[in-house]
Amino acid sequence: MMAQRYETIGLLILVALALVPPGLTLLAFMDWLKSRLTGSRRRKWLWKTALAADVLLALCLLDGWLVEPHRLTVTRIADTSPKIARTTGDLTIVHISDIHFEQDNPFVRKVLSTIAEEKPDFIVLTGDIPQLGPFDKEQLKQWLGKLRQIAPVYAVPGYYEDDAVLAGSRISDGVLLASQFKEKEVRGTKIVVQGFGPNSRISPADRPDTDDALYLVLDHAPDSIPYAARLAPDWFFCGHTHGGQVRLPFWGAIVTASFTGKRYEYGRYHLGTMQAFVTRGIGLEPRPAPQVRFLCPPEVVVLKISRSVGQ
């Protein structure tokens, strides 16, 4: 697929910013060489500026490679709905995506402990669970089993897993494929969770009869957001973009790998009565993609929905 215009512009901005420090260093060296050959006065401000730029670039590189990929964050969002029963209290939903699991390690165990601390009523997992390429299937099954012990899990496939991965994952409550849906009840609140995959085509005919139930739709990528809005769910959850994985100030994601480009790159969106959240995800794109995150740490999304005031 050819690069979209925003990707080309973003990459040009990134390259230009990356060339500033070495460019200033080269100018400072030329200034020093000129002073030695001609006896002219050196411009100390140029040396100081070059040094500051080099240090800043080094810190950004260290952050992108060594710090941010392992700095798990929790993003909290709140909503109200008349569909929440009086007996429910706050309904807590955890949303994770794009695990890109390779093997068990302290970071993926930290994901589990972070989710457990939130005491969710259920978890939605929106695809790309294993990494593309080698991954330990047995360790992934064990990890997903531990996730299921925290709360019921509703998952949809991404681009990197097949049905066998999900079927053998020990997620016993609500693995969602194609346009299947599950009904559940949490302390008096009725909920319908419907899942789609990357190859699904969403149409109004897919909508189940939800009555007064809270209606949630899951898909892997934001490409389907405009189509999902036709189903009029209360919430739509997806990942895939990684929030760009590398973001620039005032510009945001450089690459989203989505046909919708930067329109739904990351965060919370409103389309009619539907609210959508595109998460930054947990893991990293498979190699040879750079194993970096910058201004875009991995996240666990915690949505709390309470009963509307006066209802």
Image: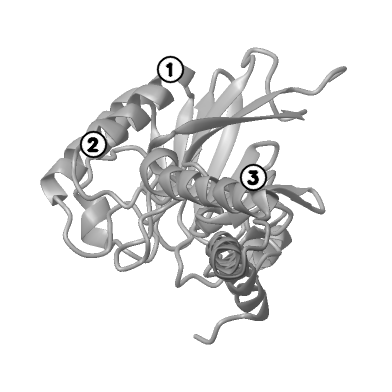
The one of 100 and 306 positioned closer to us in this rendering:
100
**Distance in Å between CA atoms under marks 1 and 2:** 17 Å
Give the residue number, with chain letter if any, for mark 3: 210
Q: Where does label 2 land, which residue? A: 143
Type of amino acid at the residue the image marks with label 2? Trp
Looking at the picture, tell me which residue is in the foreground, 92 or 292: 292
> Which type of secondary structure does the marked residue at label 1 adopt?
helix
Question: Can you give x and y, in whole percent of width and height, for residue 276 in the image?
Answer: 67, 49
Visible in this render: residue 295?
A: no
Residue 113, image x and y in percent?
35, 23
Say if mark 1 contacts mark 2, CB within 8 Å.
no
Residue 78 in sight from this viewpoint: yes
How far apart are labels 1 and 3 at the CA level? 31 Å
Decide which of 307, 284 is in the foreground and name it.
284
When the figure is inspected, residue 39 is found, relative to residue 60, above or below; the finding is below
Identify which amino acid the numbered label 1 is placed on. Answer: Glu
Q: Position of residue 63 (x, y in %)?
A: 45, 43
Q: From this view, report whether residue 212 is shown above or below residue 39.
A: above
Q: Decide: few, some or many residues near mark 3? Use Cα within 10 Å; few <14, some 14-19, many ≥20.
A: some
Other-residue count near label 1 (Cα within 10 Å), few / some / many at <14 / 14–19 / ≥20: few
Q: x and y percent of residue 189 in the render? A: 61, 25
Counting every numbered tag in the picture gives 3
Instruction: Determine whether 254 is above or below 93 in the image.
Output: below
Distance, label 2 to label 3, CA atoms, is 32 Å
33 horizontally vs 213: left or right: left
Earlier in the chain: of badge 1 and badge 2, it is 1
Instruction: Tell me the quarter of the image containing the C terminus.
Output: top right
Please, which residue is most extreme toward the front here? 39
Q: Amino acid at mark 3?
A: Thr
Disc number lying in front (1 or 3): 1
* Closest to the observer, 99 or 25: 25
Residue at the disc numbered 1 = 117
